[in-house]
Image (spheres, rainbow, N blue to C red):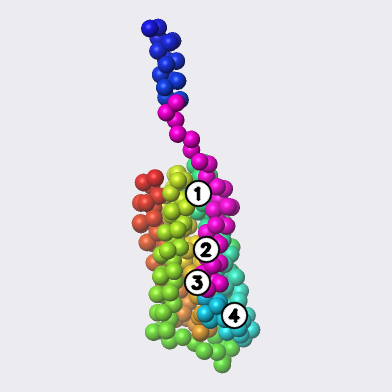
Amino acid sequence: MSATSSNKTLIDRLGTELVPVRRLLSPGQRTLGWLLVVAAIAVVLLMLYGVHPMLHRWEGAPDLAWAALGAVITAITAAWAAFALGIPGRHARWAWVPVPGMLLWIGASGLGCLRHWIAPHTSIANLHQASDCLIFIISFSIPLSALMILLLRRACPLRPVLTAVMVGLASASASASLLEICHAYDAAATDLLTHVVAVGVVVALNAAMGGRLLSSY
């Protein structure tokens, strides 16, 4: 058998053994799918707690509404950045996309440190009550992070740790947004510190564990 014939036979055999690869959904489509799960959780919480307490807090302290908006924007943009970074060839600068939302979230939340001057009659959480926020954010962030990593399992992130950081940021900010529905207290320094710690823990855990999981695909 000639070399040309042998090569052709090998190519034909390899071609018949190829398995079609299902094309990944776009980052926007996967972000939308993840956000639909977050929205479903929000609907359940709204059914349990109602929307009026949240709107009442926002009416008394509009900065809380701006902080919530910043958290929502951060969740959306960080989720999109995570899925975008999962595509080989995407530049690392996409990780900067959530920064504007984070600045709004942190800036508006920081006004809680002046809560006694802004709205002296608001109810402020003590340290024990603020710790409940920590548990809430971490508890909801775990399944949301797991879902996002599951959606990223067929991708090929060339920067798995950076991608995992975006996963953690998206999950933590989404959980903080959900907390607004059932949060009975207005922001204060202790509450803000608890949120910062919760987000930091979620991002760090994702960077350590999520990065390892993503790099194994």
Of 117 and 170, nearer the camera is: 170
Task: Check the image and report above or below for 22 versus 212.
Answer: above
| Residue 108, quarter of the rendered image | bottom right
Query: Tag 2, which secondary structure?
Result: helix
Mark 1 vs mark 2, foreground winner is 2
Label the magenta part by its dominant secondary structure. helix
Residue occupied by mark 3 = 176
Mark 2 crowdedness (10 Å alpha carbons): few <14, some 14-19, many ≥20: few
Residue under the point 39% across and 84% down:
128
What is the C-alpha distance between the residues marked 2 and 3?
15 Å
* Residue 168 located left or right of residue 23: left
What is the C-alpha distance between the residues marked 4 and 1?
35 Å
* Residue 103 located left or right of residue 171: right
Identity, as a three-letter code, of the amino acid under mark 1: Leu
Residue occupied by mark 2 = 37
Which of marks 3 and 2 precedes in the sequence?
A: 2
Residue occupied by mark 4 = 51
Of 42 and 210, nearer the camera is: 42
Residue 154's x, y, as percent?
A: 45, 46
Residue 94's x, y, as percent?
A: 54, 51
Identity, as a three-letter code, of the amino acid under mark 3: Ala
Residue occupied by mark 1 = 85
Residue under the point 42% across and 84% down:
129
Of 184 and 63, nearer the camera is: 184
Identity, as a three-letter code, of the amino acid under mark 2: Val
Query: Tag 1, which secondary structure?
Result: helix
| Magenta residues, start to end | 16-44
